[in-house]
Amino acid sequence: MMHSTEAALDPGPDASRPGALGKSPSKSRETILFAGAVSLLVLALWSIPRISFGDGGVHVAMAHLLTVLSMGTADPVLSQYFMLNLQSEPNWFIYPILAALLQVFDPYTAEKILLTGYVIGLPYAFRYAVTAVNPRNAPLSWFALPFVFSWPLNLGLYNFIFSLVWLFVALGYALRHWRAMTPGRTLTMTLLGLATYFSHLTAAIVLCLCLGGFGAWLLWCELRHPGSSGLRASGGRAPGESTANRLWVPFAAFATALLPIVVLTLLFTLRNTGQNVEFGPDLWYRTKMLVYGNVILSHTRWEGAFSTPVALLPFVAAALLLFRWWRTAARNGALGNPLGNPLNGMLAGALLVLLFSYAIPNSTSGGGLAVQRIQIFPYLLLMLWLAVVTDWTALRRVTATVAGVATVGLLAINMTYNHLNSRYLAEFDSTVRQLEPGRTMLLLDFTGWKASPDGLHDSFRLNFVGHPQSRFVTNRPLADLNIYQASTPNFPVRYRPETDPYIHLRGNGPHPETPPTDEFLMAGTRSAIRVDYVLVWGLTPARAAMDGATLTLDQLDAGYELASVSDHGWMRIYRRRE
């Protein structure tokens, strides 16, 4: 008779055996609750009057510039400062979609429609993956919910968050069909891989590592336990067909599907060989980031009360499962079937990604912050592995409970900050009518990246308003000199070399301890840049007294006049004297 502890640790029948697991009902209370939870996240998104997700405004500007530059309808000031970058860059996915939405909707509505696809897509893509082998493990898909309103979304990493959707659709498809890959299915895998790559390079690399680890594990299983993968099953499809020939099918299919990604990644690497490489957090700090769920935290350290249980759950569950298997193997005096399960290839892939998260330089992937980005994958991949190798009732219950509580807590914190930010954005947006079309503008943010403009609130990791001035370009032709993506070779629109502000005038950018150090007054003497408007955000008396603030204030006194001050004084617009 099984003791209660052993029953709790029992992972259920071997999920790799055909017919071992039953079907889950198509409609159940859990299915309805999951749909309700996702709907709540969608309603939360649409409840924000003005979304302030970090780089969101920059993406809007990029999409608009892509439209007018490609159609030849750009205002002369935009053509003077920007040009198309029609390379096979891995940051293309959202821009055609957002550009089309901007033809019909205002920028904030267009962003919300775009992000609705992500808010729905990530939970259901993960659900598609975790139910690939065992439909009864659908409750494990709740684990994805706390990651929806997490740091990548709040920072405005729109391409990256959509790459998560494509990644788990691709992995779910591979897990469903790896034993019977046909040319048509291989083509589907190829298209899913390309969609992942053109969303973000990091997810494309993760897909290669996962499928590579999966394939290597299949080969190891066959070498150690011939027939364990099921690819040597008797009965070829044609008379005289060698059953052993089926071994190469998944390897050939996955290799064919991943080949375009590998080629495009190599070309991307060759185009970016001259960029500086920063390794970022050391190994110990990366470990601490993993433990407390750093990739979830956005606004306050109190979010750690919800993110840490989510972060620890897959690692603890994986350790318990491996301990159970080790104890079974020790009792039986052999490895036993669980450790020879071919689906443990997903664990091999997850471990490769985990190791990669320790080896990757922080500047990899374009835009930096690669370590923070890639740390979202080990949690989700470990839970995916648990979903395909177990039928563990206790894990389903614990996961749904932990993820549900964390989602509610994190959503409450996120909505508090996002609605607060919306109030600041309203004042920011009220200044656009003061800017004459056909001019350039430079934003100087004295709040750094963690303080509200009135100094009443602090954010753990994020700027309160992001890049809202970039949205101005959709309403009137203005050249924004703060689009950092346009100074890199990784996006579809770039600054022209002679008008790139990040080469000729930008200083340290937003910093929590020091004021901006941009030398903009005389930029025209060393480049083709002319700064017509300077938008000064959050310049309180205390910040004006900071060491180094005189660099900006002296330039404004020497060459600019105060044109407008917003209602609360948070925004000051300076116009260049003729």
Image (cartoon, helix red, strand yellow):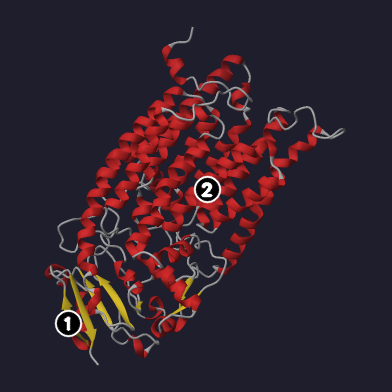
The amino acid beneath tag 2 is Leu
Q: Is residue 306 left or right of residue 278?
A: left
Q: Is residue 323 visible?
A: yes
**Position of 271 compared to 535: left or right?**
right
Is the residue 290 above or below the residue 564 in the image? above
How much space separates mark 1 and mark 2, taking CA atoms?
50 Å
Residue occupying the point 41% across, 68% down? 103
State the image coordinates of residue 249 (x, y, percent, origin top left): 73, 41
In percent of the image, x 21 and y 64: which residue is there?
426
Q: Which residue is mark 1?
A: 562
Under mark 1, the amino acid is Leu
Query: Measuring 69% from the left and 51% from the top, which residue is drawn there?
Result: 256
User: Residue 450 has which mark?
Assistant: none
Q: Position of residue 208 (x, y in %)?
A: 59, 49
- Left or right? Give the position of 544 relative to 490: left
Is 82 drawn above or below residue 327 in the view shown? below
Q: Residue 141 at what x, y percent from top left?
A: 44, 36
Q: Quadrant of the C terminus?
A: bottom left
Q: Nearer the viewer, residue 574 or 507?
A: 574
Query: Where is residue 111, by image quadrant?
Result: bottom left
Check disc 2 and report its element: helix, strand or loop.
helix
N-term mark: 1 or 2: 2
Q: Residue furthest front?
A: 104
User: In this figure, which residue is indicated by the disc labeled 2?
Assistant: 167
